[in-house]
Amino acid sequence: MIGCEQLGKRYGTRWLFRHLDLDLQPGDCLLVLGSNGAGKSTLLKLFAGIIPASEGTVQRPADPRTGIGYAALDQSVYPVLTVREHLELAAELRGCAPRADELLEEVGLSYAAEFPGRHLSTGMRARLKFALAIQAEPPVILFDEPGAGLDAAGRAMIGKVIEKRRAKTAFILATNDPEERRFATHELELGE
Amino acid sequence: MSSNWGNEIRAVIRKELCTEMRNKSATFTAVMLSVTTVFTLAFAFYGRQLTGDGAAGMLWAALLFAGVGTLTRAFIAEEEQGTGDLLRMWARPHAVYWGKAIFAFGQMALTGFLVAALFLLLTGVGVATPLMLFVSLLGGAAALSGTVTLVSAMIARGSNRGTLAGVVALPLLLPLIALGVTAGRSAFEGLATSSGWAGTAGVWLYTLLVFATAPYQFAAIWREP
Amino acid sequence: MKWLLLLGMIVATVFSYQVAPAKDFPQPELARIIFFHLPCAYATAGFSIFAAIASWRYLAKRDWIWEFRAHAATEMALTLGCATMITGILFSKVQWGSWWHWDARQTSFLIVLLLLGAYFAIRMAFEEEVSRARVSAAYSSLTLLPILFLIFVFPKLPQVAKNSLHPQGVVAKGRFSPDYWSVILTVFVLVLITAIWLYKMHVRTSVLTQSLRDQDGNLEDSGRSTTARRVDQSVSVHE
């Protein structure tokens, strides 16, 4: 489903990680742990195909549009598009149904459907990014710091999103939040 | 190209159009840049008799600077506002390239004709063969949009991208300008029409070659397969 | 190798003063700079085209050797291009009276140099090596058509060629004496051997640097300290 062989990434002469082999199947939830700068977000970007690896290969679903859902802290949203328009645009590009009302209800953002991106708070943006990540019900979901910027209700929502899809989805979560360990079937620690 | 490709490309164009319409600042700045460029060039030649050669050179220089100044924003804006990764995850590379390039062509065609109209108004240069000027400018707008869209994607994640855009795009476009000036000279003077049409054909050939290769180069740098 | 090349260049330089001057120039005696100008121009064209093709191969195969080849070839093309430009400017001053004429060949060659220079501007803008390699390869492959146009088509366009100061068809029409030609060809071979030698050293250095980085991960530390930290950090997977 998603995995890597001998994966490594370096910036300049500094390797963030190397010789990484992984193979995740539906039902697996890999928690990527590590201090700041250890390479957690970079690893998720490599799996998402957003940045290239320095060595090794990544096996990911053939069509990343519907095969991978990705939500990250450093992603933003279009300032002039409304929440609903984001979901409609993504659906059109992915070739799937927008499911805007259903998804916004699931992430608790129904009331903000017509808000433009620039009027969203950090937490609201995070919820929209989750909705976008799960829109096509992809077999692989990558969440980078999923709890960051969210209130207690938001964190509970993340739990529900993951639990609902666990059986048919492989999750990779990059986090420093000990609370999120409860989802993990595997843990990967990057660092010294 | 299947209907899915068509839908995806249309979705990218619609997104660009929507962003442009709702953010008046970008459109207004682009128009101001075009007007200022033409005015500056026309002012520099104030009181002098412009030959067909000089007029064609000035017009294409104005188009080049207006185009590079406006169109390099295509991907730089995505990276600056942090939405580049959304597009990488949602759309196939060819759809993104074609959507952005077609939108840029619309923008550049409008800018080009605005620049040309202003230029003719300010300098008082007459056009002997308007059709040749129109066809060559249209081809130039297409080639500029195809090239600058790719350059914008190339440099969007680099450092010093504002300056780098000019350094990378201008030399790539200079051969196009040489062909465009040949066509423009003939269109203004009404002389050497065969070489003028050859220049126009050259502009369109350049356009064809850009669009034949650029989508593949774009796919190689945009995201991992 | 380098001593042989130096000796060859000295012999060629001495020989270049023995041949009778070409008659087609205002200052025939001072036209001998062509012996270096023409070979450098041909070699620039060759390396530029090879660099663009190597970049295509890198994008298609994702094999680092093609990135090293493209980088080294572009570096050689720019170096030889600068030599061509300098010798051309000197020639222009001596034969035509001013340093720069906006002559078609001068101008198109300057654009080629700008295209090559932009390649290095792109490389400097990307710190991360894979992105740097990809983007510079995409750019370099894009330059293939403009370079071919600027070197082989533009200067020969009838409306451009008729206004050019460059002696049209001197080479094609064989208006140089056989002795003149023999010096040009000798210098061309010497320039080409030197350039290929430097190019190969560059490629080899790149390969070695890459393999050193792959082995110990930190080239800068490994040379100066026995406590150099291995950066292939521990990665543990707990079930």
Image (cartoon, rainbow, N blue to C red):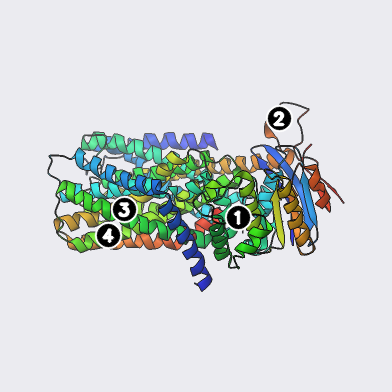
Give how far apart the Cα atoms at labels 3 and 2 are: 54 Å
Query: Dot 3: what SS?
Result: helix
Kindly identify which residue carries mark 3: B111
The residue nearer to you, when weighing C161 against B105, is B105
Query: Dot 2: what SS?
Result: helix
Query: Dot 1: what SS?
Result: helix
- Dot 4: chain letter: B
Give how far apart the Cα atoms at labels 1 and 4 are: 52 Å
- Rendering quarter of residue A101: bottom right
Measured along the vertical axis of the image, is residue C15 above or below residue B20? above
Give how far apart the Cα atoms at labels 3 and 1 are: 40 Å
- Dot 2: chain letter: C
Query: Dot 4: what SS?
Result: helix
- Rendering quarter of residue C128: top right
Position of residue A169 in the picture relative to residue B19 (left or right): right
Do the residues indicated by labels 1 and 4 lie within the same chain of the protein? no
- Rendering quarter of residue A57: bottom right
Give how far apart the Cα atoms at labels 4 and 3 are: 14 Å
Using the image, tell me which numbered label, if any, was put on residue A90. none
Q: Residue furthest front?
A: A111
Quadrant in the picture for the C terminus of chain B: bottom right
Q: Are marks 3 and 2 in contact (CB under 8 Å)?
A: no
Kindly identify which residue carries mark 1: A111
The residue nearer to you, when weighing C151 against A186, is A186
Do the residues indicated by labels 4 and 3 lie within the same chain of the protein? yes
Using the image, tell me which numbered label, if any, was put on residue B136. 4
Q: Disc 1 marks which amino acid?
A: Tyr
Give the x, y percent position of residue C183: 37, 43
Using the image, tell me which numbered label, if any, was put on residue C221. 2
Q: Is residue B40 visible?
A: yes
- Dot 3: chain letter: B
